[in-house]
Image (tube, rainbow, N blue to C red):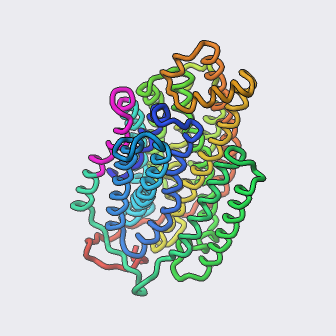
Amino acid sequence: MLAMVLAMLDNMIVGTAMPRIVGELGGLTHLSWVVTAYVLGTTVSTPIWGKIGDLYGRKTIFIISIVIFMVGSALCGMAGSSLLGGADGGMAELIAFRAIQGLGAGGLIVNVMAIIGDLVPPRERGQYQGIMAGVMSLAMIAGPLVGGFITDHLDWRWAFYVNLPIGAIALAMIVTQLHLPKLRHAGGTVRIDWAGAGLLSVGITALVLITTWGGNEYAWGSWQILTLVAIAAVTLALFVAVERKVVEPIMPLQLFANRNFTLISIIGFLLGFAMFGAINFLPLFQQMVQGSTATNSGLLMLPMMGAAMVVSLFVGKAITVTGKYKIYPVLGGIGMAVGMWLLSTMDVHTSSWVTGIYIAVLGLGMGFLMQTTMLIAQNSVEQKDLGVSSSATTFFRSIGGSFGVSLFGAIFNNHLLSELTSRFGEQAAERVAKSGGRMDPSAVAQMPAQMRTGLVESLATSISGVFWWAILFAVVVPVLAAFVKEIPLRGGAPAPAEDEQAVSPAAG
């Protein structure tokens, strides 16, 4: 629970602090990359963390991932500072360090889910994952508040430094209190599928660069984009070929023969695509358009997180009592689609309390989906593949988020330039856009009235357009969830195990 707080708190703090970070380091058009780098680092590392945990046990891997996350956090806090040579290239440094932070977060998140799977049988797992979802929601509530306070009253760098004391407490608790079986492969020495991991990482990175640069940095038909398309196609094809032959694949392809696992993987991708891609723009709307302070924009996220927490706790308990779970991802998909539609109707006249109602509806949908999808995926595989199942589910959600942030970022940038051009003309739009690359809400307030009005209206229209696109992906979720087969949840608590005990991964 401490480790999950660490990962979730960071995401929400950074989201609230982003307008101030952009104001100091510049690069409004690169805003999405700060999130993309983190999500990409998480995504490419998740399958590796999950597989290594399955083969060798999770405690040491868990500790290593937390240390990497803390190192990345410290470096992010120093980005653009005199410690690293000054403000020039500060945004590039922050993006690179966020990728390191994401590498640690990948192991952090997947090991939390797999450890619950190691210790708790599926029939009882719903309430534990519901509690974990509640902790995640509490972290999401606290994150914007802490982020807003840090942004308004301290240096934004503390949005990253705050992870260090929390991480130290988590490490101390894990080292002294967490007792898990050391899982060793029954066949003896094994080899990690580094070839598969490398090919997957290259292929996914190429895909994210395509969605980030296509139509923005480079034309869709440019040689840069076409080269990336070729790299993605070749490496992913080679990845599939490698996974068919290796003894311990990073992502066993036979898992996709299971209908539930395949459906949940697709649902997770769409959930990440719509949710992470679109929610990234809420603090920008609240601060730039509605004029909220960073602290108040954090408070305005409370309805979404509160709704998600209450629903997650209810769903977890209901699953444990009834053993039924199919209806919840269907309800979650419907709630998420309705929430996205409501958010797409926002404009410069939308009040903060109306926005709060809209995001509360989105939170209800998230609460039905967040942990239920993980439970279904874990219940669809054997105990020996628990880590792979957890990492695959997290992987598809993360890669969906990476694609969503990149694609919606490109949509936002293009739409914003188009709106500014229609209001100010091409040359004036470029000047406004360039001035917007290094600004925060206070800088907007000091602009001439006509420029300020045009910029705020352009931002509002562009952000609403992002939510319109998110609807297209959100509506597919309940349709796919309706085809999930309700497999009875396995019961029976596992026998206690100590760190020194060596067992087969199948001994669940």
Give yes or no for residue 151 being in the magenta stretch: yes
The location of residue 157, given as percent across then percent down, is 37, 39
Q: Residue placed at 34% from the left, 79% from the top?
A: 503
Work out whether residue 128 or residue 220 is closer to the camera in this orientation and state it: 220
Is residue 134 in sight in this rendering? no
Q: In the visual, does 78 lie left or right of 281?
A: left
Residue 267 spot, x, y in % from top left: 62, 54
Residue 373 higher or lower than 28, as above or below: below
The residue at the point 60 percent across, 61 percent down is: 204
What x and y, as percent, mark residue 297? 46, 27
Residue nearest the observer in this picture, 240 or 319: 240
Left or right of 478? Residue 317 is left
Residue 44 located within the stretch drawn in magenta: no
Q: In this view, does 115 lie above or below 350?
A: below
> Horizontal placement of 48 versus 328: left or right?
left
Residue, far left: 176
Which residue shows up at 73% across the image and 31% down it?
A: 418
User: Residue 308, relative to residue 381: is it above or below?
Assistant: above
Q: Could you say where residue 393 lies in the image, as x and y percent from the top left?
A: 54, 59
Quadrant of image for the C terminus: bottom left
Main secondary-structure element of the magenta-colored stretch: helix
Of residues 137 and 102, the one drawn nearer to the viewer in this rendering:
102
Whether residue 339 is visible to the viewer of this picture, yes or no, is yes
Task: Name the foreground residue: 440 vs 354.
Answer: 440
Please give the name of the residue rendered at 25% of the width and 51% of the height, measured from the top-left corner.
169
Residue 435 vs residue 223: left or right?
Answer: left
Residue stretch in magenta: 149-167
